[in-house]
Image (tube, helix red, strand yellow):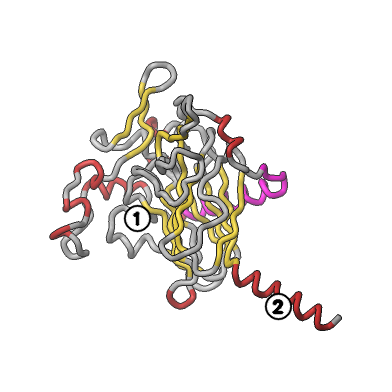
Amino acid sequence: MARLAFVLSFFLFLLSEAMAATFTLTNNCQYTVWPGVLSGAGTAALSTTGFALQEGESRSLDVPAAWSGRFWGRTLCVADASGKFSCGTGDCGSGAVECSGSGAAPPATLAEFTLDGSGGMDFYDVSLVDGYNLPMLVVPQGGSGGACSSTGCLVDLNGICPSDLKVVLSTSEGGSESVACRSACEAFGSPQYCCSGDYGNPNTCTPSSYSQFFKNACPRAYSYAYDDATSTFTCASANYLIAFCPSTTSQKSSDSNPEAAGIPSSNNSTMVYSSELVSHATPTVPRVATALLLAVAVAVAVVTLCLDF
């Protein structure tokens, strides 16, 4: 009996070591979001690479030790008559809900992680280097060491995006609406904005007026390639909550100044997209208690970020 107990304890220890963290993705947007997942080179793929979250839904993923990768949200997704799946923003080009090793087409807001890195610390950030498509918040839970700070971009930038960076799509009413905001690198392809060529180091690649637009609105998010000092955060032995549209107010971003208003809500888009595609994934409908805990965590993180800003 003692030997059986020892074997069971050892198995549970190995299991806890193999699964380093739990990531919970929650959708506070007023529309369906299809999260995408891309594991870094040399790290294990997770149990899913893409799925659907309807408004108010959450899903948890177990992440192995020393994992690195990124998460993002896809929006305005549909399947055509042949069943090919595509998204208006953040599309990974797989033709299916699962991204299967493909990353997000810019512009897309990215949450990036390297677990159990230097000194045993987790390194994480929210990046707008590849542009922006929806608000996102990352909240460490139960961690130790490092600052374990929340980070993200709480502001809806789509309505206030500079005109030469806007991505505009048609609405169901026959009009048009800005659904994403490109980076200057994607928009213009210049080495100055892409931090490439002669600008491929932190001494020559400095913030531009375009990257400053992102930084002013979202001070903790990466705004250009060498924005490490104010945009990379550390924690150890934490689980992580990733919230899409963490602010739940309904004010349109195009009607407000993000610095004056504090945290405008996510875009109340009128685009045509299909919520029926949820059946292709296996989203978890949160129980009342779980939903309440997630809402409290998001609310605390949002208030903390507002006070810091």
Q: Position of residue 266 (x, y in %)?
A: 47, 37
Residue range (magenta): 285-306
On the picture, is 74 further left or further right than 169?
right
Magenta stretch, main secondary structure class: helix
**Which image quarter: residue 133?**
top left
What residue do we see at 19% from left, 46% from top? 189
Q: Position of residue 231 (x, y in %)?
A: 37, 60
What residue do we see at 22% from left, 47% from top? 209
Q: Position of residue 113 (x, y in %)?
A: 45, 61
On the picture, is 299 further left or further right than 137?
right
Let me know if residue 292 is in the magenta part.
yes
- On the question of residue 215 being in view, the answer is no
Give, as a three-letter code, the residue at label 1. Answer: Tyr
Give, as a three-letter code, the residue at label 2. Answer: Phe
Please determine whether, in this image, residue 67 is positioned above or below residue 267: below
Q: Position of residue 84 (x, y in %)?
A: 46, 33
Tell which tag, 1 or 2, sits nearer the viewer. Answer: 2
Q: Kindly state the secondary structure of the residue where label 1 is placed.
A: loop
Q: Quadrant where the N terminus lies? A: bottom right
Please determine whether, in this image, residue 147 is positioned above or below residue 220: below
Mark with earlier residue (1, 2): 2
Name the residue furthest right: 1
Mark 2 — residue?
A: 10
Q: Kindly state the secondary structure of the residue where label 2 is placed.
A: helix
What residue do we see at 23% from left, 41% from top? 187
- Closer to us: 153 or 89: 89
Let me know if residue 235 is in the magenta part.
no
The dot on residue 190 is: none
Mark 1 — residue?
A: 222
**Which image quarter: residue 239?**
bottom right
Asked if the residue under mark 2 is in contact with the one under mark 1, i.e. CB atoms within 8 Å, the reply is no
